[in-house]
Image (cartoon, rainbow, N blue to C red):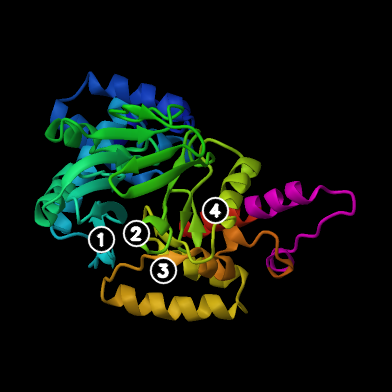
Amino acid sequence: MVLVDWLANLGPGVAGCCCCCAVLVLLVTYRRYCSRSLWARSLCWLMSRTERPLFRVALYTKTRLGYLFHKRQLKKARDRHPTGHSFTQPSIFNDIKIVPVPILSDNYSYLIIDTHANIAIVVDPSDPQLVQACLEQEGAELEAILCTHKHWDHSGGNKALKKLHKSCKVYGNSFDNIPGLTHPLSDKDQIEIGQLKLQAFFTPGHTVGHMVYLLDGKSFGGPPCLFSGDLLFLSGCGRIFEGNPLTMLSSLDTVMALDDDTLLWPGHEYAEENLLFATTIEPQNAARETKLQQVLEQRQQKLCTCPSTIGEEKEYNPFLRTHTSELQDSLGLQRASDEDATHFRAKVLEEVRRCKDLFKSR
């Protein structure tokens, strides 16, 4: 590989550097010595093989580097999965339809459609091409984009869709550098579009400005629906890139306070891996075992595993079980008599996250 050879020629001190900033400087320097196409191929090769958290997060933020990586990932996904990575079915509640749109290798965008008025909201439209095709198939006009956070695999389609739908609003938190943002949101702000009523919750931890969106089911006679981005997955939660365990715990507790019948629509198809991980730290959890068997059957057929419910997640998602003695004992953690309960739960969460990060890198 040309990039590897070039780095090696710089000497062991530079080539072996683990600092993300140094790597980026090297890439800029390397760009001067090769053609544009060779540089792009070399860059994407390096991106696809590093698991260093600081470098990985740089690939998904609003930078030129992140943009190039996102475009490459879109092309690869469209070539490999022209109809999407999973088979999905819409959920219909009277006049409201929720359509999961499989994007990239494991992401989900979501169309929330008011079928009576033929208007739609999209959550995290990473691939504008697939989202637009789905809108045309449903015969709905896009009124708003709800962006959970700035990473390209969630926000990459914002500007392109805004160009196609001139009156479309782009919602998100201003702390995140969200492409095309027109309507900055704060914690517990309300959004009303047609009969669609949503509330935004500020849930930092994965990024500094992460938001989740709760669709109120009362207005259409259905269940509440949480679009959780990278805060919460089926049996998992997002990496803590721009926060600390206490911050993430507070955000997860926001979700824990929701009604148990709330449907969970996460930003990724991580269910199988997350449940397999949960097996390693709570092997005796019967609810987890039942859910795992269900998910294994679904994934054998490449079926979408969304949604679960918040009530279900409380039973088997280790990131929502930091308060339970079962999980604490399994991790070998015991609260000291003078230790604050919240700080202890943050310690438990940090250990679960550490174990999950190691599990993912195997």
> Alpha-carbon distance for marks 4 and 3?
21 Å
- Residue in front for this viewpoint, 16 or 94: 94
Say if mark 2 contacts mark 1, CB within 8 Å.
Answer: yes
Q: Which mark sits nearer the N-terminus, 2 or 4?
A: 2
Task: Answer whether residue 75 is visible to the viewer in this image.
Answer: no
- Give the magenta range: 327-350
Residue that label 2 marks? 220
Relative to 114, does residue 203 appear above or below in the rendering? above
Name the residue type under label 4.
Val
Name the residue type under label 2.
Phe
How many neighbours does mark 1 have within 10 angstroms: few (below 14), some (14-19), or many (20 or more)? some
Give the label, 2 or 4, closer to the camera.
2
Residue that label 1 marks? 95
Residue that label 3 marks? 272
Q: Name the residue: 31% across, 27% down.
A: 182
Q: Name the residue: 23% across, 38% down.
A: 157
Query: Where residue 174 sits in the image (x, y, percent)?
Result: 43, 27
